[in-house]
Amino acid sequence: MNSTNLRSVDLESLELATKNKLENLKFLQKMKSTKQLDAVFQKAHDAEFKKTDCLNCGNCCKTTSPIFRDTDIKRIAKHLRVKEAAFIAQYLRIDEDRDYVLQSSPCAFLESDNTCNIYEYRPLACREYPHTNRKNMYQILELTATNTMICPAVARIVEQLKIK
């Protein structure tokens, strides 16, 4: 975990999530059969993000890589006025799942104030992160468990759901 510039409350949330990794995974797997699972997550997501500003953290951009789809690559390369092949060569690699991801972390487009210098053109995975307000949550509960150790807001959402 990269604790650079994380607020203490965010660091505490991530440390708790790491400590409770197995417990969180089991809890989320049990939630799979919850009626209205999407609505439960949406409500918790909305409550958390009323008080969370991602620009105070940016841990996702500092420690992980989104998947870059072909359409993301085309859009970003066009914005940067480079050929797609040049964009891929400079910034991306193919991971073990055969997806394009960043060559390294932190993200090359992350500014020192945690803003993104390609924000309007960023990959879909970045647009949708942390994926706690989407439909069919039952499909990504394992990813959600992983995201508790990356995103303090996800960690707090899962802790709140465990209380209810």
Image: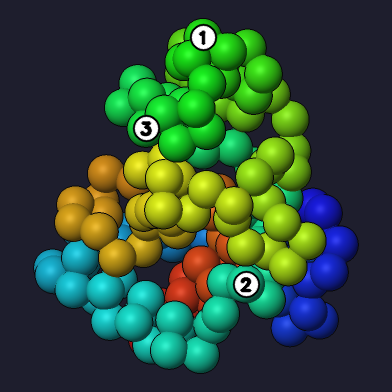
Secondary-structure class at tag 3: helix
Residue in front for this viewpoint, 30 or 149: 149
Q: Which residue is mark 1?
A: 85
Mark yes or no: residue 63 visible: no
Position of residue 49 in the picture relative to residue 12 (left or right):
left
Q: Which mark is residue 94?
A: none
- Judged from this view, the residue extending furthest toward the right is 4
Secondary-structure class at tag 2: helix
Q: Which residue is mark 2?
A: 55
Labels 2, 1: front one: 1
Q: Are marks 3 and 2 in contact (CB under 8 Å)?
A: no
- Judged from this view, the residue extending furthest toward the left is 35
Q: Are marks 2 and 1 in contact (CB under 8 Å)?
A: no
Secondary-structure class at tag 1: helix
User: Residue 110, percent across and down?
Assistant: 68, 51
User: Residue 57, percent across and down?
Assistant: 68, 69
Q: Which residue is mark 3?
A: 75
Q: Residue at x 50, y 27 (%)?
A: 81
Q: Residue at x 41, y 29 (%)?
A: 78
The kind of residue on which mark 2 rests is Leu
- Crowd band around label 2 with a 10 angstrom C-alpha radius: few (<14), some (14–19), many (20+): few
N-term-proximal mark, 2 vs 1: 2
The kind of residue on which mark 1 rests is Ala
N-term-proximal mark, 3 vs 1: 3
Position of residue 54 in the picture relative to residue 126 (left or right):
right
Q: CA distance from mark 2 to mark 1?
A: 31 Å
